[in-house]
Image (spheres, helix red, strand yellow):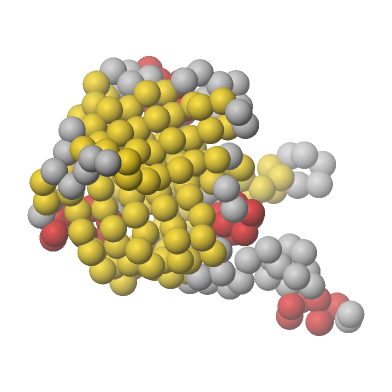
Amino acid sequence: MTIDEVKKQAFAMPLTSPAFPPGPYRFINREYLIITYRTTPEAIARVLPAPLVAPEPLVKYEFIRMPDSTGFGNYTESGQVIPVEFNGEHGSYTHAMFLDDEPPIAGGRELWGFPKKLANPTLGVSADTLIGTLDYGPIRVATGTMGYKYKSLDHDAVVKSLQAPGFLLKIIPHVDGTPRICELVRYTLGDITLKGAWTGPAALDLAVHALAPVAELPVLEVVSGVHLIADLTLELGTVVHDYLAS
């Protein structure tokens, strides 16, 4: 290949067979179990990068089923999101994500900076209970439960919450191990079709693990449980802060 051919074809690795296609990325029947809980301010402060600030010591623990997604296929995801503010704009910071499919791990990390690691999350219904789990190797590190479709939520309010921006810390190292890219990235979800939204009694249990440290944001009090099903598009992002330029 010539230099020009390499530059024209280069999108993602490997050069001749990228792990994921160009975006944006459409998700059909994306299903969420989101359990919001209160943690300690000290725990938030240890993991939240400036210039983001957390108005309250809240965490959203998410289990997400994605049965039909452009280029990424059929997979499940689980992790922690922290409600934040950036320059007066309300949004959320993704602190940790665990999933069971290589293309969205590669694409999420390389494009936006999603903090994705390989693990085994699940989300499903057993009788009257919506159940989410996360196993890291043979160890169960998270279990979330919620009463199944107890009460419908306001459609417009839920769509507005999905439209709020997300923030990510994108880090890509140089060949000498120093940071080549260290940026705060902003992204949004678009073209949202909400198919259902419910709340009900919820509970969350987190276990200690050295490499899946979800319990480092301990559960003091469960605030709410939400179950959503929607079609949406994960749009490409923008850089809002360059740590290496500061």
Which quarter of the picture shows residue 225? top left
Q: Is residue 12 left or right of residue 41?
A: right
- Quadrant assignment for the C terminus: top right
Q: Nearer the viewer, residue 23 or 65?
A: 65
Q: Is residue 62 above or below residue 229?
A: above
Q: Nearer the viewer, residue 14 or 149?
A: 149
* Quadrant position of residue 30: bottom left
- Residue 144 at least partly seen: yes
**Residue 202, above or below 233:** above
Q: How far across and how far down the image is residue 14, in percent?
A: 77, 64
* Coordinates of residue 184 in the picture (x, y in percent): 49, 48
Residue furthest right in the image:
1
**Residue at point 13% right, 60% down?**
156
13 vs 3, left or right, is left
Residue drawn at the location 51% of the way across and 55% of the way down: 75
Q: Is residue 236 left or right of residue 226?
A: right
At 42% from the left edge and 23% from the top edge, which residue is drawn?
206
